[in-house]
Image: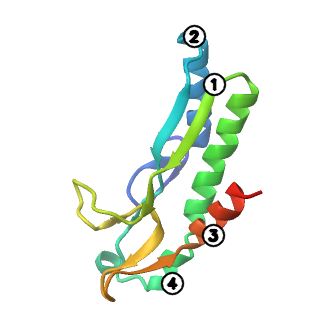
Amino acid sequence: MHLGKRTPVDFYNYPTGLENVTLYIQRNYKNPVIIVTSKGYGTIDERKRNYPKHLYIKDNERIEYIQGHIDHLHRAIKSGANVMGYIVSSFMDSFEWDAGYVLKYGLIYIDHKNGLKRQKKNSAKWFRRFLWT
């Protein structure tokens, strides 16, 4: 049995777990500064799944993933956890050591078929609005 919703790259989306582990660290390790790094939602490259590009731009699952984790970190902060940062996995799709360019974690879509043209995904637009509100 797994907690949370399975992602396209066989990880699980379980933001409550991030809150729980953060509060565990607070209680058991004298509340050190915590910076959550490389927290991202991966998808599979469209060339491997034959998905049209627009499905990668409309990445609502990534928005749900990031929002859920930030919400649960906020709860942990309100409970006294010393969280000082949250870093989304990748600004743009990049090379992964174990998968090359097949996995897509970025907020910016890189079109490998069109001269590496970049396009903001919905998650990039959402994240910008989140940061500036």
Q: Earlier in the sequence, mark 1 or mark 3?
A: 1
Q: Residues within 10 Å of mark 4 (few under 14, many from 20)?
A: few
Q: Is residue 45 above or below residue 32?
A: below
Q: Identify the residue position indicated by label 3 in the image.
A: 125
Q: Position of residue 23 (x, y in %)?
A: 62, 23
Q: Is residue 120 left or right of residue 95?
A: right
Q: Amino acid at mark 3?
A: Lys
**Amino acid of disc 2:** Lys
Q: Quadrant of residue 70?
A: top right
What kind of element bears circle 2? loop
Of circles 4 and 2, the one toward us is: 2
Secondary structure under badge 1? Answer: loop
Looking at the image, residue 28 sits to the left or right of residue 7; the answer is right
Instruction: Please give the label number shown on residue 94.
Output: none
Q: Are marks 1 and 2 in contact (CB under 8 Å)?
A: no
Q: Is residue 132 left or right of residue 14?
A: right
Q: Nearer the viewer, mark 1 or mark 4?
A: 1
Quadrant where the C terminus is found in the figure? bottom right
Task: Give how far apart the Cα atoms at labels 4 and 2 are.
Answer: 46 Å
Image x and y of residue 96, in percent: 27, 57
Place of residue 15 in the rendered image (x, y in percent of width and height, measured from the top left): 59, 42
Give the amino acid type for the residue marked by disc 4 in the picture.
Answer: His
Q: Residues within 10 Å of mark 2 (few under 14, many from 20)?
A: few
The mark found on residue 54 in the picture is: 4
Write down the quadrant of residue 49 in the picture: bottom left
Per the image, the residue denoted by label 1 is 82
Are the residues tagged 4 and 3 within 8 Å (C-beta)?
no
Q: Secondary structure at mark 4?
A: helix
